[in-house]
């Protein structure tokens, strides 16, 4: 019973003080919102890039062609040898017939295709498409495959592989840097926020200490205040980002059609499935930890000097 | 056992409720506020602590509240050695002491009722008990008709009575009053002193720091006079006039 009434008291006082110091509350929520908004945007970029990288990495195929007149058994043996490499995720055999059918479909009009009848001009074009786990290892793998007997030619795009792995690293560095800066800003913000709250209620705290309030009781309303500021400070940017997500994607797709139209963006549910809990946790966590540490430091000092 | 009963047990102890045992207090600035003071106050006593400004009276109040620790010697209050109290025990200790200040120290954004109830909320008294005791306490100080008023709507005397109700609502063993009439006119001052006497008759030990000569002289209580951090006089049924020497 007592615990419940203390909890009710803390929530009531926390809310009261939020309203009472509203200018200051709005400023704190604003800063928190700005931080988490930036965090959200950063997360959009990182998550989508990673998604695209993963997709691109596995879709960067290495195509392997065979010597003329090779038998099916020999082709199978080559396939087994390629699969020995750890970096190889999967291989896909495309027969000469499939290649020709695909070519006809994509490049020729039905009339033109009909003139070939049953002939297959690409009869030596059977191939393996080799997909890798790690795009960075492409060069090594290509070299290996070229050394296998019966392999005539290996086609790969070195520049695409290099660009992708470079991008991956760059995004890693940038996101680490931005997250560190954001955390620093947030820590400073909360410390200032709660310190101001305390100075507004210095008198009240000293009266509580005189009457014999336990530290936990004094901290209660400040913790509620910090958590609520964090909660609202997370909810606002999440709402804005949610409503903006598709618009941002539409904008990017429209502006940079030629570069991005082949890349798939993550859908809104996937992105927010992670972003919502992470943002709320950061907001509430910073609110709680920040107010807890600041109040504790103040109470230790204040008890001695009533 | 419910925390609520703690003070009742403390009231039954037999030892002096306040004991200064060769206590000195030197602040970090080098000021010797209190110098080798020994003082014993028994249960149920009414004591005036008088002396000029800077004589060490406030430091003694601070020592009794464990707002500071003695540099030398021991301070026992309500059966506890205050120098040995751990930080976490200080709040529980203070619940056995009521305090009243010259500037009332009421929460301006709360009503009279809320100010008094606050003292009980703080020590986690069940709300049904709060609802019974707060009106009773406010009736005792004559403020039954002001429950919903805010401190700024009250006279100084009324505000001090609210502060007194707040100090008493948790049934303290000891009531410390630091210049309780310092901001009041004579009529209101007398009213506060009569209330303190009434509280004392009911068994609470009372220590009043004051400059009010008229009150000290006419109330004929024990008077402890401090000068330059030393007790220069300690008289039963004493007066301020004698203390001037």
Image (cartoon, grey):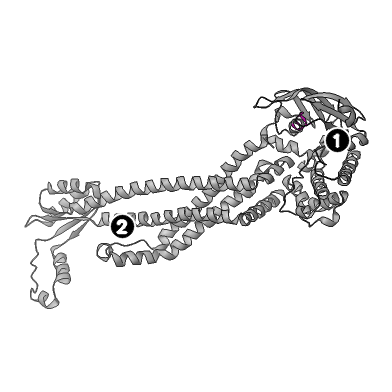
Quadrant that contains the C terminus of chain A: top right
In the picture of the structure, the residue carrying the numbered disc 1 is: B205
Q: Are marks 1 and 2 on the same chain?
A: no
With B103 as the anchor, is A189 left or right in this view? left
What label sits on residue A64 in the rendered view?
none
Res. B2 visible in picture: no
Assign the magenta stretch its main secondary structure.
loop
Residue at 86% from the left image edge and 46% from the top image edge: B188
The crowd level at tag 2 (other Cα within 10 Å; few <14, some 14-19, many 20+) is some
Q: Name the foreground residue: A281 vs B211.
A: B211
Which chain does the residue under circle 1 lie in? B
Q: Which residues are magenta?
A: B52-58
Numbered-mark total: 2
- To which quarter of the image does residue A43 belong? bottom left
- Indicate the position of residue A249 as horizontal and vertical percent values: 35, 64
How far apart marks 1 and 2 lie (CA) works out to 78 Å
Residue at 64% from the left image edge and 49% from the top image edge: A221
With B165 as the anchor, is A168 left or right in this view? left
In the picture of the structure, the residue carrying the numbered disc 2 is: A52
**Secondary structure beneath label 1:** strand
């Amino acid at each position: 019973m007592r615990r419940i009434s203390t909890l009710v008291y803390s929530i009531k006082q926390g809310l009261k003080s939020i309203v009472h110091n509203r200018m200051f509350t709005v400023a704190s929520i604003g800063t928190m919102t700005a931080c988490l908004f930036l965090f959200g945007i950063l997360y959009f970029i990182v998550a989508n890039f990673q998604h695209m990288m993963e997709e691109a990495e596995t879709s960067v195929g290495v195509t392997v062609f065979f010597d003329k007149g090779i038998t099916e058994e020999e082709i199978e043996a080559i396939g087994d040898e390629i699969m020995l490499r750890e970096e190889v995720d999967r291989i896909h055999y495309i027969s000469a017939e499939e290649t020709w059918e695909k070519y006809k479909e994509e490049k020729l009009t039905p009339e033109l295709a009909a003139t070939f009848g049953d002939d297959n001009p690409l009869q030596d074009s059977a191939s393996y498409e080799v997909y890798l786990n790690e795009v960075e290892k492409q060069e090594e793998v290509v070299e290996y495959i070229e050394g296998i007997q019966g392999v005539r030619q290996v086609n790969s795009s070195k520049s695409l592989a290099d660009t992708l792995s470079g991008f991956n690293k760059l995004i890693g560095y940038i996101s680490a840097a931005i997250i560190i800066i954001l955390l620093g800003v947030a820590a400073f913000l909360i410390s200032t926020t709660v310190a101001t709250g305390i100075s507004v209620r210095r008198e009240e705290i000293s009266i509580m200490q005189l009457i014999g309030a336990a530290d936990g009781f004094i901290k209660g309303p400040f913790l509620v205040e910090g958590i609520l500021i964090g909660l609202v400070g997370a909810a606002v940017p999440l709402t804005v980002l949610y409503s903006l997500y598709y618009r941002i994607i539409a904008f990017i797709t429209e502006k940079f059609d030629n570069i991005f139209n082949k890349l798939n963006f993550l859908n809104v549910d996937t992105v927010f499935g992670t972003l919502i809990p992470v943002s709320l946790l950061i907001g509430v966590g910073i609110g709680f930890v920040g107010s807890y540490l600041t109040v504790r430091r103040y109470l230790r000092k204040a008890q001695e000097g009533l | 056992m419910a925390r609520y009963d703690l003070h009742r047990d403390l009231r039954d102890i037999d030892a002096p409720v306040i004991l200064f045992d060769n206590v000195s207090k030197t602040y970090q600035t080098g000021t010797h506020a209190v110098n080798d003071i020994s003082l014993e106050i028994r249960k149920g006593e009414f004591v005036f602590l008088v002396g000029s400004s800077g004589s060490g009276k406030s430091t003694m109040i601070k020592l009794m509240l464990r707002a500071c620790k003695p540099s030398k010697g021991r301070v026992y209050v309500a059966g506890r050695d205050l120098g040995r109290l751990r930080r976490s025990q200080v709040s529980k200790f203070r619940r056995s002491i009521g305090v009243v200040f010259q500037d009332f120290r009421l929460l301006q954004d709360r009503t009279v009722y809320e100010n008094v109830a606050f003292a009980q909320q703080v020590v986690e008294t069940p709300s049904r008990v709060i609802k019974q005791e707060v009106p009773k306490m406010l009736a005792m100080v004559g403020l039954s008709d002001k429950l919903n008023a805010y401190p700024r709507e009250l006279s100084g005397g009324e505000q001090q009575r609210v502060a007194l109700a707040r100090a008493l609502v948790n049934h303290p063993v000891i009531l410390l009053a630091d210049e309780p009439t310092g901001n009041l006119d004579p009529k209101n001052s007398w009213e506060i002193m009569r209330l303190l006497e009434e509280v004392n008759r009911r068994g609470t030990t009372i220590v009043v720091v004051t400059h009010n000569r008229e009150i000290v002289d006419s109330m004929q209580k024990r008077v402890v006079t401090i000068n330059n951090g030393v007790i220069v006089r300690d008289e039963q049924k004493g007066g301020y006039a004698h203390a001037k020497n």
